[in-house]
Image: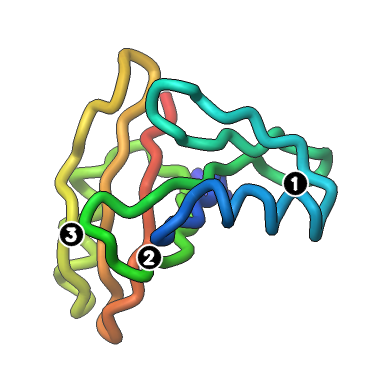
Amino acid sequence: MSHPVMYFEVSGKDSEKLTRFYRDLFSWSINTDQNTGYGYVDAVEPGVGGGIATTPDGSPGQVTVYVGTSDIDATLARAGSLGGSTILPRTEVSEQIVIGLLADPDGHVVGLVEQA
């Protein structure tokens, strides 16, 4: 199985400011969830969709790329054997979405999305 980039997320101190910036810069269609403030960036062919969020701890944030995998646990274990580490173990976000986060040997965070 290939491991395609499935999603991206930009997080920072002010999601409204980030949403305006990326909407104006790239003319992205961004739908903001009124309850959470999370902005869903619509995918534009041939690209992938993404999200814009406020960091829960007020940190400067980061950009995270989410890669598809058929087995998050196995991918996290393999990352660990190659010098990486698990940041977030396999986590069910909803009935359809399961994610995990790893750090590479230099500390860069990469997201995982489980594919059926």
**Foreground pick, 85 / 58:** 58
Q: Is residue 92 above or below residue 76?
A: above
Looking at marks 1 and 2 on the same chain, the residue that comes earlier in the sequence is marked by: 1
Residue found 38% across the figure and 62% down from its top: 110
Label annotation for residue 61: 2
C-alpha span from label 3 to label 2: 15 Å
**What amino acid type is highlighted by mark number 2?**
Gly
**What amino acid type is highlighted by mark number 3?**
Ile
* Residue 16 coordinates in the image, percent (x, y): 55, 47
Give the residue pinned by disc 3.
87
- Disc 1, disc 3: CB below 8 Å? no
C-alpha span from label 1 to label 2: 23 Å
Residue found 21% across the figure and 57% down from its top: 57
* Residue 17 coordinates in the image, percent (x, y): 58, 55
Label annotation for residue 2: none
Q: Secondary structure at mark 3?
A: strand
**Foreground pick, 82 / 28:** 28
Residue found 26% across the figure and 46% down from its top: 100
Q: Secondary structure at mark 1?
A: loop
Occupied quadrant, residue 95 = top left
Label annotation for residue 47: 1
- In this view, the residue farthest toward the top is 95
Q: Is residue 78 above or below residue 107?
A: above
Q: Is residue 57 above or below residue 95?
A: below
* Residue 66 coordinates in the image, percent (x, y): 46, 50
- Quadrant of the drawing holding the C terminus: top left
Residue found 40% across the figure and 40% down from its top: 113
Mark 3 closeness class: few <14, some 14–19, many ≥20 residues within 10 Å: some
